[in-house]
Structures are given as C-alpha cells and as structure tokens.
Image (cartoon, rainbow, N blue to C red):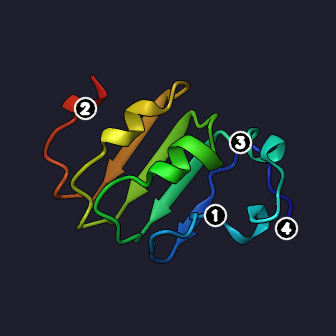
Amino acid sequence: ENMDIDDPIDLEGSYEEPQLMQPSFTQHASQESRDQITRLQFSWYDFQSFPRDIVGQAFVNLQHVDIRQNANLNCIESIAQLPHLVSLNLSDCPNVRSLVPLA
C-alpha cells in the first residue's frame, strides 16, 4: 500500500517509556525522511501526556495531530512545542480538561 506524506498515520497500540513511538515503517527512516511527516494520528494509546520524544525528536514538522480514544490523557502541554502545528483534534479524551497550555 502506498502512503502519501500527508496521509495520517494511525498508530494503534500502547505507549511505554522510554521507547520512541514510531510506526514500523519509520523506525529506520532518516531524520530527513521523518521531517517530511506532517500528520500523525494516535488511536487507543494509553499515555497520560503527549510524548515529548515525538515533539522534540522524531517528528519535528508536525502540522496536524489527531488523538483519539485515550481516557488517560490529561496533559497536552508538550504539544505547544510544535512550531508548525495548524490543527489539533482531540476526540474521546475525557481527562483533558484545559487547552490553556496551547494558548
């Protein structure tokens, strides 16, 4: 299956520190290749805060972030570090109580 750079990446599974959360097809990708990824979708990940290694290391040019079905997520503060962020979709993340960190 061919994927376009702007296609969302659906990363279903669970997050465990300190592993860098990457889909299998990017694990061996160069930073230059990862810099071309502008959209990520996280579904059913069980993290309490948005992983800082995603923000600061793996995918620095994210413009669109979609987080779905994460009942434990309560802190999205690190998303504010994404300088190119255009859109953020939070769906079924009931413990995110404030977007103030993004203001």
Residues under numbered marks 1 and 4 in contact, where contact means CB atoms less than 8 Å apart: no
Q: Where is residue 95? Give x, y as percent.
A: 16, 57
Dividing the picture into quadrants, the one containing residue 3 is bottom right
Precedes in sequence: disc 1 or disc 3: 3
Dividing the picture into quadrants, the one containing residue 73 is bottom left
Precedes in sequence: disc 3 or disc 2: 3
Marks 3/4: CA–CA distance: 15 Å
The three-letter amino acid code for the residue at tag 3 is Asp
- Would residue 34 appear left or right of 47 to someone viewing this image? right
Marks 2/4: CA–CA distance: 37 Å
Q: Secondary structure at mark 1?
A: loop
- Pointer 2 local density, CA inside 10 Å: few below 14, some 14–19, many at least 20: few
The residue indicated by pointer 2 is 101
Specify the label residue 6 is tagged with.
Answer: 3
Q: Where is residue 4? Give x, y as percent.
A: 79, 48
Please state, as top left, top right, bottom left or bottom right, where the N terminus lies in the image: bottom right
- Would residue 73 appear left or right of 43 to someone viewing this image? left
The three-letter amino acid code for the residue at tag 2 is Pro
- Pointer 1 local density, CA inside 10 Å: few below 14, some 14–19, many at least 20: some
Marks 1/3: CA–CA distance: 16 Å
The three-letter amino acid code for the residue at tag 4 is Glu
- Which residue is at the front of the view, 58 or 8? 58
Q: Where is residue 67? Give x, y as percent.
A: 41, 54
Q: Secondary structure at mark 2?
A: helix
Precedes in sequence: disc 1 or disc 4: 4
Residues under numbered marks 1 and 3 in contact, where contact means CB atoms less than 8 Å apart: no
